[in-house]
């Protein structure tokens, strides 16, 4: 068991967030489609990962097509292939924490 993922919360959980903060977090984060990640993006990402299957950071099998410059800040680059990279889930989470202090709405 470890502390809840929300900084400062001391509730112990197996992983992620305690029930109190999981619900609050779900209410804060918009859906993937509200954030611009449509079914079109899902198809594009799957096709791209077939062409570029390796994580650019660690070399493991990638499962995420990441925006190098966050789409949240540069929506004009959302569909620019030069702004995409393949990352494994672990490297994608580390990048999110490093650049934005974790997943935020």
Image: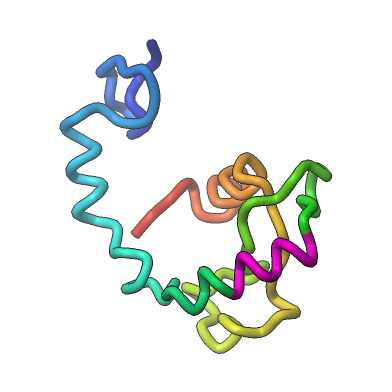
Residue 18 as seen in the image, left or right of residue 72: left
Look at the picture and state if 60 lies above or below 30: above
Q: Is residue 3 left or right of residue 92?
A: left
Coordinates of residue 19 in the picture (x, y in percent): 19, 30
Q: Coloring scheme of the render?
A: rainbow
Q: Eyeballing the image, is 95 above or below 52?
A: above
Q: Residue at x 32, y 73 (%)?
A: 34
Q: What residue is drawn where x is 36% and y is 19%?
A: 3
Q: Nearer the viewer, residue 74 or 78?
A: 78
Side of 105 relative to 21 (left or right) = right
Q: Which residue is pictured at 60% across the width and 44% down the height?
A: 89
Q: Is most of the magenta stretch helix, strand or loop?
A: helix
Quadrant location, the N terminus: top left
Total labels: the figure holds: 0
Residue 4 picture quarter: top left
Left or right of 60, for residue 18: left
Q: In which quarter of the image is the C terminus?
A: bottom left
Residue range corresponding to the magenta coloring: 44-52
Decide whether residue 28 is among the magenta residues: no
Q: At which x and y percent is residue 42?
A: 51, 69
């Amino acid at each position: 068991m470890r502390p809840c993922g929300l900084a400062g919360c001391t509730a112990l959980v197996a992983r992620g967030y305690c029930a109190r903060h999981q619900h609050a977090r779900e209410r804060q984060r918009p859906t993937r489609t509200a954030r611009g990640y449509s079914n079109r993006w899902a198809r594009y990402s799957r096709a791209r990962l077939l062409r570029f299957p390796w994580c650019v950071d660690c070399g493991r099998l990638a499962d995420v097509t990441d925006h190098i410059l966050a789409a949240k800040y540069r929506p004009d680059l959302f569909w620019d292939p030069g702004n995409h990279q393949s990352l494994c889930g672990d490297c994608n989470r580390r990048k999110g924490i490093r650049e934005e202090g974790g997943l935020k709405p």
